[in-house]
């Protein structure tokens, strides 16, 4: 009951994260924009199934990077390495210029990476406030909070309500409502609010609109746009090409466990993107958008 | 006891285009202990009408004592079922724990006892509770380290601990006069008017209050619900689900140990053959109390009501002159009704 909440590796990761914060907006001395997150030559296998086969990824400050690819191309595997749900077999990951190794979602969160998983990772029978703070509950001050892990429910509810307000999610009326009583879009909003509330460096969304209707999808897309406007870099996995082309600054195409191209909505069409996904089209490095691009005026 | 005070909002939310049945469904969904509470009150009214001896203070105190063993063990069972697990070894661990207590405390002059060390009763008590915690931790370790299903693990340890009790303690019952009074303290009664409150009943109620509070107000409590509700979501949220599961089985062991102490007091002796059906009885109490066997949903107060319902129905039917077989039948029907109700209530999700 009075087990400690800390992970063994937590301290190291957190101190890392704090160091990085001091570097102003990831701009190095020579004026080149440095990526906030990179992956190089990542390999991840599940038994005989190859999830990632030397995949790379770069995410630059303030951009929405869409990751697209056919089923089994390794999109989810790739981002799960950065959210701590998978541990890559080999390869190098950096966040804010420092190399990181995540052994759990807890580690990734400690480094400022928040993920909205495809299944949302919410507990349906718990209320909104509990879900927002699941795994990092606000505890009472003093001995009761430290030793007995007593919850400060009042503060949790007040702050959870504030986070939802900040994101303009007004339809959720009661913070003590259980999540299972919410609509799909509202649940998604809770999951996005949780990511936005805690994500300090990167927010990753895995198929955020797959289960939603048109209106609810539009609201979630608006939330993503708001996140970008607040300067938060976002990785968006989606099957929905129109959405990707509407929202993304750059589009990372994943195929057979590798990054085969990075394009932009301005340089390539949806048909091109599909052709790249299926291997019908190869793109020269010169035609790709491997570096940062001008922000799109949405 | 309730999580919210803003009921009007919810009523509006749920009220749109729904009839009385839907309202009841969502109300039961929110307060899972409402249905057992209703059943308990209705049952008590009916049995009082059938036989006015039912509601007498002497009968009420008898019923409280009949409920104390299963009621205390059901606290442990509730914690475990909340994680979508099940513990079939609860009774075996309880018996093992109380046999450890009794044997260690018996003085050497009593022959024929294996560990007649004549330890002070409180040392024996702590040893017995500790053994129960270790036994629970063994269950927890097998379930989390080897990812075995709780049903199978506890089916195995049910046999293991039952056998250990018989092997180590020669299947011998330690009679009341041989035991130090400290070990029998939970059987002492205090008179409140003509109601006689047994110390064990007070202890049981205290444990209910304590664990209801812990579940509601600590991070651990939230994690117990989360792990039972959706283990994958809990894991992705950064909860160490294995550690939570392990701790639940160990904490359950502690409660089981205390239940062993209460059992010695209630029965007045320490027998390896006490309460043979107690495992299933605890599950019955938990299920009737509105806790879902699928995990993540349920309350301590519900389980207490469930334990009371079983006792009230059995006692009431006996007073009404029905045969034992009918009482068993009635409890069986109650369980099925409770699970059917749970399924119906869960539909509100979709």
Image (spheres, rainbow, N blue to C red):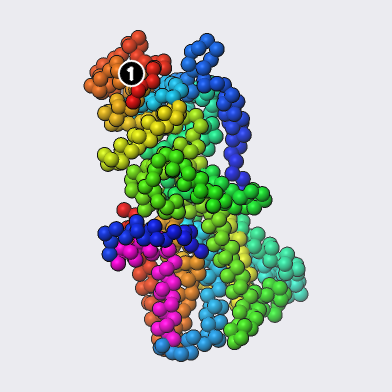
The local secondary structure at tag 1 comes to strand
Q: Is residue A193 above or below residue B138?
A: above
Type of secondary structure dominating the magenta stretch: helix
Q: Give coordinates of residue B345: x percent, y percent.
A: 35, 61
The answer to whether one can see residue B159 in this image is no
Q: According to the image, label 1 marks what residue?
A: A263
User: Does residue B191 appear left or right of residue A79 in this picture?
Assistant: right
Q: Residue at x 73, y 64 (%)?
A: B123
Q: Is residue A271 above or below residue B305?
A: above
Neighbourhood count class around disc 1 (C-alpha, 10 Å): few under 14, some 14–19, many 20 upward: many
Q: Nearer the viewer, residue B281 or B102?
A: B281
Q: Nearer the viewer, residue B348 or B79?
A: B348
Q: Give coordinates of residue A68: x percent, y percent.
A: 33, 27
Q: Give coordinates of residue B255: x percent, y percent.
A: 59, 63
| Number of numbered callouts drawn | 1
Q: Chain of mark 1?
A: A
Q: Residue at x 49, y 32 (%)?
A: A113
Residue stretch in magenta? B20-48
Q: Give coordinates of residue B31: x percent, y percent.
A: 43, 63
Q: Is residue A244 above or below residue B253?
A: above
Residue B26 within the segment the image draws in magenta: yes
Q: In the figure, residue B204 lies in which quadrant?
A: bottom right
Q: Is residue B302 above or below residue A35?
A: below
Residue A121 within the segment the image draws in magenta: no
User: Does residue B259 appear left or right of residue A198 in this picture?
Assistant: right
The answer to whether one can see residue B334 in this image is yes
């Amino acid at each position: 009951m009075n087990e400690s909440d800390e992970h063994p590796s937590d301290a190291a990761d957190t101190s890392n994260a704090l160091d990085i914060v001091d570097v102003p907006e990831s701009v190095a001395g020579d004026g080149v924009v440095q990526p906030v997150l990179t992956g190089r030559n990542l390999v991840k296998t599940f038994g005989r199934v190859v999830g990632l086969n030397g995949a790379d990824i770069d995410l630059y400050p303030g951009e929405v990077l869409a990751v697209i690819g056919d089923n089994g191309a390794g999109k989810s595997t790739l981002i799960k390495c950065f959210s701590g749900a998978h541990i890559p077999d080999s390869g190098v990951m950096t966040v804010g210029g420092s190399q990181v190794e995540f052994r759990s979602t807890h580690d990734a969160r400690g480094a400022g990476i928040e993920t909205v998983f495809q299944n949302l990772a919410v507990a349906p029978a718990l209320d909104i406030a509990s879900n927002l703070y699941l795994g990092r509950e606000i505890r009472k001050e003093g001995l009761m909070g430290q030793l007995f892990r007593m919850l400060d429910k009042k503060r949790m509810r007040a702050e959870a309500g504030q986070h939802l307000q900040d994101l303009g999610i007004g339809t959720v009326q009661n913070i003590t409502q259980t999540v299972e009583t919410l609509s799909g879009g509202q649940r998604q909003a809770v999951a996005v609010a949780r990511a936005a509330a805690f994500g300090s460096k990167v927010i990753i969304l895995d198929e955020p609109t797959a289960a939603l209707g048109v209106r609810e999808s539009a609201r979630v897309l608006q939330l993503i746009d708001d996140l970008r406007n607040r300067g938060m870099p976002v990785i968006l996995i989606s099957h929905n090409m129109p959405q990707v082309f509407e929202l993304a600054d750059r589009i990372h195409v994943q195929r057979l466990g590798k990054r085969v191209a990075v394009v932009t909505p301005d340089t390539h069409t949806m048909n091109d993107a599909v052709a790249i996904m299926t291997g019908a089209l190869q793109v020269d490095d010169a035609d790709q958008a491997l570096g940062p691009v001008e922000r799109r005026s949405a | 006891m309730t999580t919210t005070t803003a009921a009007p909002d919810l009523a509006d939310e749920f009220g749109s285009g729904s009839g009385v049945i839907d309202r009841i469904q969502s109300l039961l969904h929110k307060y899972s202990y409402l249905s057992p509470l209703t059943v308990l009150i209705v049952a008590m009214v009916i049995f009082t009408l059938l036989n006015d001896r039912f509601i007498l203070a002497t009968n009420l105190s008898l019923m409280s004592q009949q409920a104390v063993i299963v009621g205390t063990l059901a606290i442990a069972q509730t914690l475990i079922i909340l994680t979508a697990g099940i513990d079939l070894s609860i009774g075996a661990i309880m018996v093992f724990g109380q046999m450890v207590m009794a044997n260690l405390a018996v003085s050497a002059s009593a022959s024929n006892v294996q560990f007649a060390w004549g330890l002070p009763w409180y040392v024996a008590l702590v040893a017995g509770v500790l053994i129960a915690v270790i036994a629970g931790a063994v269950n927890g370790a097998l379930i989390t380290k080897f990812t075995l299903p709780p049903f199978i693990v506890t089916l195995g340890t049910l046999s293991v601990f039952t056998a250990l009790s018989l092997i180590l303690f020669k299947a011998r019952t330690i009679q009341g006069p041989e035991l130090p009074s400290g070990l029998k303290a939970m059987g002492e009664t205090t008179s409140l008017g003509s109601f006689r409150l047994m110390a064990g009943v007070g202890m049981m109620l205290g444990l209910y209050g304590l664990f209801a509070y812990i579940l509601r107000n600590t991070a651990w409590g939230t994690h117990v619900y989360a792990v039972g509700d959706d283990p994958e979501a809990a894991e992705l949220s950064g909860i160490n689900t294995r550690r939570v599961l392990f701790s639940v089985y160990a904490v359950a062991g502690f409660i089981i140990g205390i239940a062993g102490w209460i059992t010695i007091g209630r029965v007045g002796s320490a027998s390896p053959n006490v309460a043979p059906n107690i495992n299933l009885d605890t599950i019955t109490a938990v299920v009737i109390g509105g806790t879902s066997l699928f995990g993540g949903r349920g309350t301590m107060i519900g389980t207490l009501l469930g334990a009371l319902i079983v006792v009230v129905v059995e006692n009431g039917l006996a007073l009404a002159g029905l045969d034992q077989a009918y009482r068993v039948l009635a409890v069986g029907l109650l369980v099925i009704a409770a699970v059917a109700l749970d399924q119906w209530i869960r539909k509100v999700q979709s």
